[in-house]
Image: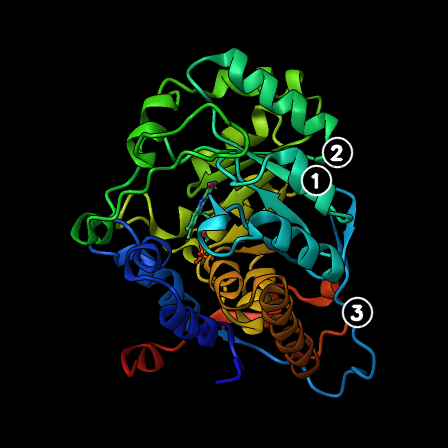
Amino acid sequence: MTPATLDDFERLAGEVMAPGPFGYVVGGAGDEVTLGENRAAFHRWRLRPRVLVDVATVETATTLLGTPVAMPVGLAPTARQRLLHPDGEQAVARAASAAGLLQVVSTMSSDSLEAVAAASSGPRWFQLYVHKDRTVTQRLVERAAAAGYGAIVLTADFPVSGRRERELRDGFALDWGGLGNFPDLGGVEFLPLMTALHDQRLAWTDLEWIRRVSGLPLVLKGVLTAEDARLAVEHGCDGVLVSNHGGRQLDRVAASVDALPEVVAAVGGRAEVYLDGGIRRGVDVLTALALGARAVFVGRPQCWALAVGGEAGVMQMLGILRDELVNGMQLLGTPRVADVGPAHVAPGLPSAVSSR
Ligand SMILES: Cc1cc2nc3c(=O)[nH]c(=O)nc-3n(C[C@H](O)[C@H](O)[C@H](O)COP(=O)(O)O)c2cc1C
């Protein structure tokens, strides 16, 4: 099968991946209510197209914290990408660079952050999990700054791991030795290790320290409420990433796209607002932009594409999303990213919702 959509990559990945790793990537926490809602909620919004707009030329380019990118879509951080392909994060780095897109590299990458940077010629941010031993974290963010990462993306929704029951059922527990940024760790299970290392005492007052030691702009990932969005801005965050970790942490929280409007309103233009969770279509991107996101990030689709075709697979996946976005912008009557606004989206009628 030639993949025509991002979901096709999931089907193809299911054919090439062993059940354990596949379940680890596709699964969510608990009953996977939030995982399903991340997609379903997009289906409940309706686009409001304008006609007779000159769409002969479409420009998808935008900027993220001042950095030019080819479209308002980036690669979300996902851990240990060599689980999917031997080239791991370096393959994603090459694909993202070729496409002119932003890659967010996980603290828990297979390759060291320096190795990923060496493979990248494009914009990249570093996703941070804060270690109980702050000297480890300080060293990590200093390395990220030295390696040319343009911002720190602090993941705030992972004081402990969510309960991912597919992994329990599959008995899937990797020995996650070989983490590129922590070459000394090995022979231990990954999720208990993550919980043991993460600082559950991390608090708003720590943000200032992270900004200081990194010297980089700070994006807070995992915000779902107006209250936390306001605190993020008050504590100097440059960006707020509306995310429920792809439904992998607390189940039954809101779909990202449903949390987006209250976060956008609370931020009030004082920081850039991004979204991840359930982005599978160009029209998902347009819906998020219309609701006030500056850009969106894709998580699982890059994992599937990487598993299916390595660097070429990720390129192909990003090309499909770009084609869908361009097509959607032409049909919505919005030739530039900045043209997409609140008037282009409305809640779906209840009848349309209940017929699904
Ligand atoms: C396999 C996998 C690993 C992930 N690892 C990380 C990680 O290391 N750090 C992080 O902040 N988020 C991580 N995430 C969450 C993603 O960054 C993102 O929030 C989520 O995947 C977006 O939802 P989507 O998969 O529906 O696009 C991971 C997600 C998946 C699927």
Does label 3 or label 2 sit earlier along the sequence?
3
Q: Residue at x 61, y 30 (%)?
A: 237
Q: Secondary structure at mark 1?
A: helix
Q: Residue at x 66, y 81 (%)?
A: 327
Query: Quick one: 189 or 195, which is closer to the camera?
Result: 189
Instruction: Look at mark 2 in the image and give the residue it sits on.
Output: 148
Q: Residue at x 29, y 61 (%)?
A: 19
Instruction: Look at mark 3 in the image and give the residue it sits on.
Output: 59
Tell me if mark 1 has few (under 14), some (14-19) or many (20+) residues whose alpha carbon lies within 10 angstroms of its own.
many
Q: Position of residue 15 (x, y in %)?
A: 37, 73
**Viewer-nearest of labels 2 and 1?**
1
Instruction: Look at mark 1 in the image and give the residue it sits on.
Output: 117
Does label 1 or label 3 sit earlier along the sequence?
3
Q: Secondary structure at mark 2?
A: loop
Tag 2 near tag 1, CB within 8 Å: yes
Q: Position of residue 241 (x, y in %)?
A: 53, 44
Above-or-below relation of 217 to 69: above
Q: Residue furthest left?
A: 169
Tell me if mark 2 has few (under 14), some (14-19) or many (20+) residues whose alpha carbon lies within 10 angstroms of its own.
some
Query: Quick one: 164 or 82, which is closer to the camera?
Result: 82
Three-letter code, disc 3: Glu
